[in-house]
Image: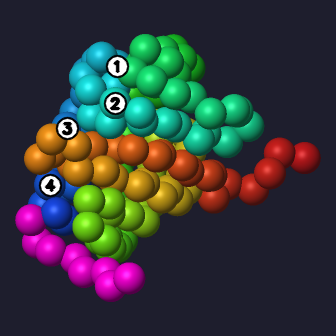
Amino acid sequence: MSTTVTTDIRSAIASTNKEFMAAFKRGDTAAIARLYSTRGQLLPPHSDFVSGADAIGAFWQGVLNLGLKEAVLETIEVETAGEIATEVGRYKLLAQEGVPADSGKYLVVWKNEGGSWKIHRDIWSTSQPAAS
């Protein structure tokens, strides 16, 4: 299986990540949920699978309810194979007044759905030391 990275796909992912960050900042979990594929799933740490738009929106609302105000995503690499792309990156979550709350790494599997690149599988883990 050959993999390629096209500028168009990388640009589409960058654009969707900007939409995610903007929606997160304004607390619009419905907009966040729309960025996921119809069979999209979150695979968050310390939790089971979160599947479907309603559950994804509710998950992100719970994150916002913890006092988080901003998500910052940084793409490190993108690889594609047909209608699937993978993105590896870093994230930061910020609380009130830009206070760092968490940072770590993520892997997103993207799926081309109806001509639009959607988040299909979203998994991340903190880079912070485990609590003692």
Which element is circle 1 on? helix
Reading the chain from its start, which is encountered first: label 4 or label 1? 4
Amino acid under disc 3: Glu
On the image, numbered disc 3 is attached to which residue?
19
Q: Is residue 62 visible?
A: yes
Q: Which residues are magenta?
A: 1-8
Reading the chain from its start, which is encountered first: label 1 or label 2? 1
Question: What whole-number distance in Å separates the C-alpha atoms at marks 4 and 3?
Answer: 11 Å
Question: What whole-number distance in Å separates the C-alpha atoms at marks 2 and 4?
Answer: 18 Å
Give the residue at x 83% y 45%. 131
- Left or right: residue 92 versus residue 114 is right
On the image, numbered disc 1 is attached to which residue?
29
Reading the chain from its start, which is encountered first: label 2 or label 4? 4
**Dot label at residue 12:** 4
Reading the chain from its start, which is encountered first: label 2 or label 3? 3
On the image, numbered disc 2 is attached to which residue?
38
**Label 1 neighbourhood size at 10 Å, few (<14), some (14-19), many (20+)?**
many
Give the residue at x 41% y 55%. 109
Give 41 or 127, whichever is nearer the viewer: 41
Q: Please tell me whether mark 1 or mark 2 is closer to you in this view.
A: 2
